Amino acid sequence: MEETKMDYTFHRMDTQGFYKLDIPEKLNMARLIVDYWAEHGRGEDVAIYYEDQKITYQELKDLTDSFANALHNLGVSKGNRYLIRTPNQPEYHISFLGGQKIGAVPIPTNTMLREYELEHIINNSEAVAAITTTKYTEAVENIRPKCKTLKHVIVVGETQGDQISFEQIMREGKGVPPHVETLKDDQAYFLYTSGTTGPPKGVVHGHRFIVGAGDPIGKYTMGLERGDICGGPTALTWMYALGHNFLFALRWGVSTAIYSDERFDPEGAYEFIERFKITIFAGTPTIYRIMLAVKDAEKKYDTSSLKYCLSSGEPLLAETWREWMRRFNVKIIDSMGQTEAHEFCTTQTSLPVKVGSMGKPLPGIEVAIVNDKGEQLPPGEMGHLAMRTDHPGLFLEYFKMPEQMKEVALPNNWYDTKDLATVDEDGYFWYGSRSDDIMTCRGYRISPAEVETALQEHEAVLESGVAGAPDPEMGDKVKAWVV
C-alpha cells in the first residue's frame, strides 16, 4: 500500500538550528497514537504482535473505543483514575489507551506488588476501578474493603461474585465513544515509584508526554521508521519499557511485539527476537549479560533483523557493550532516564560512542551539571544532574506530595534528578551515583556505582550491589553483595 503523506510530528528546527517541539494545547495521547494511524493510511498495519495474534491499528482503534465505552457505561469519567494489574498482554494496552480516550487516567502496576503497596496506590490515587486477570484478583479482593473509592473490579478471564467480565463489557461497549476533550497538561497516566524513604510516590504525566518524550526518543534514540518492530523482555509497567516497547512504537506508527513470558529466560529472549523479527530490542545491562552467557547464541538464533539494541536501568559496562557488538554486530544504545521524564541523555543512533557514558542530552532537552545554587559546573566536576523544568516530557507532579516537589526544585528553573554526574569536554555525561547513596569512608566520598562497576569487570561476577554500613571508626564501611 502506498503510504499517505502526512505530518504527524510536532518537531521542527528553529532559525538557529535548534530542535523545537510545538505541542498543541488540545491533545489526547490515545487518539494521537492509535486513531491517527487508523485514519491516515496505516489502518491495516500491525500495531501489536502477541503470540499468534496480530492486531492492526484499525482493530486497536475499535478495541480501545469499546473499552472507552465500557468505562463510560460504568460511570467512569474524565479525571477518574483506574488501576491496571495485568501481565504483558493486549488487554493491558487496550485498558491503558481506552480509558485515556474519555479522559480517564490509567495507573499501571507491577503484578509483583504486595497487598499493602496496592492498597496505598489505590487509596492515594482514589482509583475507582481496577483491571486485572483471574490469576491476580486475590490481592485486589483482599484489600477491597480498605479501599473506599474502588467501585469496580474488571477481570480478564473467569470472574467471581460482583467482579465484572472484561470480555463481556468489551462486547457491550462496541461503537464510537463520547468525545472528551483533553489538554496537553491534563493527567494522562500515573506511575508509582518507590523512594528511598516513605511510601511509593505517584508520578503524574500529562498527555504532552507522548510528544515531549516520544518524538525525540523515537527519532534520535530508536531511529524509528515504518516497518520497525519494537520489543523486549521487561514489564510494561516500568517506564523504560512502557515507552520503548509500547507508547513510542505506536507514536511513530510502527509495531510492538509483546514478550509474554512473566519470567525472563535468555534463550526465550533470543527466540522472541527471531520469531517476531525484532528490529529495536530494549533490555537492561543485566539482561544483556545473561544473554551473552548463552554459548554460541549468535549461531543458534537468527538475530539479523536487529537494527539497534537499547539499554537503561543501570550502568552498561564497556565489556558488555563490546562483547555484544563483537558477537551480534549491533550497537547497544545506552541511556539515562527515570520515571519522572523517561530518557533525557542517550548515546543516540548518530553519535560516536563513548562506552560507559550515558551519552548526550536529546535534542530539545537542556541538561546540565549544577551545584546547589543552580549554577552550571565546569567539565569534570561532580554535581547535580539536572534538566530544565520546561521539558515537555517531564512529569506534572508527585500526586498529593507538594513537599516532594520542593525537594527536586533547584534555583534557575532546574529539576534535580537526585543523581550525581559529570560532563566531559565533548558534552558527554557520565553517571556518578544517586545523591543520597554517597558513602563516606575514612573521609573519602565513595560512589557505590563506581565500586559496583569495578566488581562487575571481573569475569566471575554477574551482578553486584554496594552500600555503606555504619562504622564508628570508618564512618561508612563499604559492603558488597555479589552474584
Image (tube, rainbow, N blue to C red):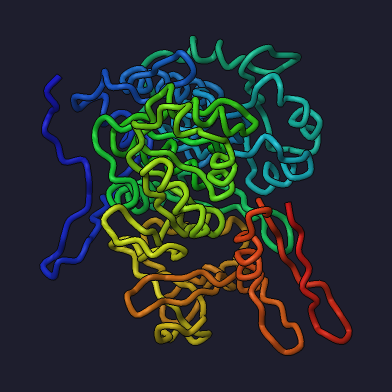
Residue lying at 78% horizontally and 39% vertically, measured from the top left: 115
Res 167 → quadrant: top right
Res 18 → quadrant: bottom left
Q: Position of residue 136 (x, y in %)?
A: 71, 26
Query: Toward the viewer: 136 or 431?
Result: 431
Query: Toward the viewer: 177 or 363?
Result: 363
Residue lying at 65% horizontally and 22% vertically, measured from the top left: 133
Q: Quadrant of the N terminus?
A: top left
Q: Position of residue 252 (x, y in %)?
A: 29, 38
- Of all residues, the one furthest to the right in this rendering is 472
Residue lying at 46% horizontally and 15% vertically, measured from the top left: 173
Q: Is residue 423 above or below residue 217?
A: below
Can residue 396 be spotted in the picture? no
Q: Is residue 172 left or right of residue 306?
A: right
Q: Is residue 204 left or right of residue 280?
A: right
Res 231 → quadrant: top left
Query: Toward the viewer: 268 or 294?
Result: 294
Q: Position of residue 27 (x, y in %)?
A: 32, 44
Q: Is residue 77 above or below residue 383?
A: above
Count all numbered tags in the image, as a single digit: 0
Residue lying at 63% horizontally and 32% vertically, measured from the top left: 85
Can residue 38 be spotted in the picture? yes
Q: Is residue 435 above or below residue 458?
A: below
Q: Position of residue 210 (x, y in %)?
A: 37, 46
